[in-house]
Image (cartoon, coloured by chain):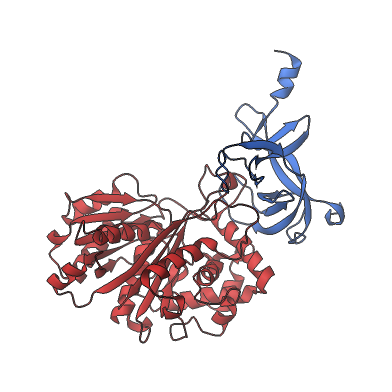
Chain colours: A red, B blue
Amino acid sequence: MEDVYVIGVGMTKFGKHPDRTAVDLGAEAVLEAIKDAEIDPRRIEAAYCGHVFGGMVTGQKVLAQVGLAGIPLTNVENACSSGATAIREGYLAIRAREHDVVLAFGLEHLTTRFRGALTPGEDDLEAAVGLTMPGIYAMRARRHMEEFGTTREELALIAVKNKRNASLNPYAQFQNPVTLEEVLNSRLIADPLRLYDCSPVSDGAAAVILASGWAVAKLSSRRAVRIAAAALRTGTVEVGLPSMAFEELTHRTAQDAYERAGIGPEDVDFAEVHDCFSIAEVLRVEGLGLYPVGEYPKRVARGEADINGRLPINPSGGLLGKGHPLGATGVAQVVELVRQLRGEAGDRQIARAKVGLAHCRGGKAAGIEGAACTVIIATR
Amino acid sequence: MSDANVASQAYVPFRQGLFRFEEGVGELLGGRCRHCRTWYFPSRRVCAKCLSQKIEVLPLSKQGTVYTYTTIYQSTPEFQVPYILVYVDLPEGVRVLAQLTQCSPEAVRIGMPVEVVFEEVGRDQEGRAIIGYRFRPVGPWVRES
C-alpha cells in the first residue's frame, strides 16, 4: 500500500467570529493549506470535509469559494472526531491508490448554534434525564478521584498548563494564561468541574493537504510529514458495570494505531489529545498508554507534560486553550503535529520531536462507552 | 369513557418501555438475554454479548448503590439547576442514570444506597402529569426533615 504524507497545513484563528460564516472560515484554512503545500490547487483530486452542525453540503460550498468545485467531496460527521475522520478518509483513499493528492478539512461555527453546556443529543435517553457533556466528565472525574486519589488542584493544573501553552499559540482562542486560583474560583458547571475545566464554544476551521509518496517525490515537497497510522473505532455497547475511570475505547483505538505504525507509546515524543475537559486529558493520556494509569495528574503537577517536560501533552493549548470548533478540532491537532515535526511551532516548539500523536474522541449516546475515537500518528 | 379509563390516562410516562407504573407504584424494566443471561437497561433488540435476539423484559431491583455523581449547575433550558445526577449500579449488573431527589449536594456519596422512585417530572400539553424515575437515599442516608 502507498505511504501517505501531509504536505500542507492551514487553520484560522480559533475563537468567536460573529461576522464570519463557517464556509468563509473553511475557505481561509483551505487556501492557507494550499499555499503552505506550494502546489497548484488543480493537483487536488478529492476532498473530505468534517463538520457537525454545518448543515447540508457545507464542504461543497467551501470548494466553490476556493475554486475547487467539481472534484469528488464527501461530508463527514462523527461528532468531535469529524475532522480526524475526514483526514482518515483521505488517508485511506491514498493508501488504496485511488488518489495521489487529497484535501481534508474541518470547520464549525458553534457560537451561532450554542451557548453553555452541550448535551449528548436531544433524543438521547440520558440527555432526557438531564445529562450534559460536562456532567458525564464530572462523574468520570469523581471516579478518578475516588480510585486514584486525584485532587481538585491537580485537575486545575491541567487547565493552567493548556492555557499557558495557548498563550504561545497565535491561533488559539485564549491568549492569556490563568492561575491555579483563577481555575479553582471559576464558577461551578458540573461539580467538581468549573468553567476553566471546560473547553469553550468556538468557531474555526483547519485544513491539511495529503499526498502519496509518489506525489511527494514528484512535487519535491521537502517539508512532508508522514502519517504512520490513522485508526478509527466506535464505542462498544456497555455490558455490566465498566470502569468510568479508564477509557477502554481510547485504549483499543490506540492499540490499533500503534500496531499499524509499528510504534509503541514509549516512542511518542508529544501528543495532542482531546481535552474537552481537564479530566478528559487524564483519561485520554492514560488510555493511550502515554502515562501510567492513575498517575497522570501527579505527573502534570511535576511538570512532566509541559512543553519542555519529559512527554509534552497539548503543546498547542489543546481544546481547553486553543478552543474547540467541533469539526475543525481533529484537523487542527494534525496541523499542530506537522508544525511541531517541521520545527515551525515558534515559541511553543518542542525540542527534537520526531513522533507525534493526535487523539480525538467524539459523541456520547446512552448505553455505549463513546461514539467515535481516532488516533493519528505522524513521524518526521 | 369510563372512570377507569380517565384514571389510566391521568399521566404519561416520559418515555415508553422503560418502566411500569400503576396506582402510584412503579418498577424499572430491564432486558435479560435468554441465552447468556446478561441484563440491559433499557432492554435491547439484540444482546451485545452473544447477539441473541431472544431478550425478555423483566422488572429490575428497586435498590442499588451510587457508582458516581455530580451536581449540575449549567444545563439546557428545560432543566432547573442545580440538580444532582447519579449513576446507580443495580444488583442485576446494570447501571442507570437518573436524578437524585430528597438529598442535598453535600450529602451524596459514592457507595450510598438508594432506591428508585417515580415522580411527576413535568406536564404535557394536555395538562397530564409526565412520570419519570429518580432515585432517593435509603436507610441511614435519608435526610431528616
Picture coordinates of residue B113, whole percent (x, y): 79, 54
In percent of width and height, residue A65 lies at 20, 54
Depth check: give the residue in front, A113 or A145: A145
* Left or right: where B9 falls relative to A88: right
Pick whichever, A11 or A187, lies toward us: A11
Residue A136, picture quadrant: bottom right
Residue drawn at point x = 12 percent, y = 59 percent: A42
Vertical arrangement, residue A309 with respect to residue A156, above or below: below
User: A107 or B81: which is nearer to us?
Assistant: A107
| Residue found at the far front of this picture | B35
Question: Is A304 left or right of A78, judged from the image as shown?
Answer: right
Count of numbered labels shown in the rendering: 0
Q: Residue at x 75, y 59 (%)?
A: B108
A146 horizontally vs A365: left or right:
right
Q: Nearer the viewer, residue A85 or A69?
A: A85
Residue B103 lies in what quarter of the image?
A: bottom right
Quadrant containing the N terminus of chain B in the rendered view: top right
Regarding residue A347, the answer to whether it shows in the image is yes
List the single residue furthest toward the top: B1
Picture coordinates of residue A376, whole percent (x, y): 37, 67
Residue A118 lies, in percent from the top left, at: 51, 53
For the question of whether residue A18 can be seen, the reply is no
Residue at the spot x=51%, y=73% of the render? A289
A201, above or below B48, in the image: below
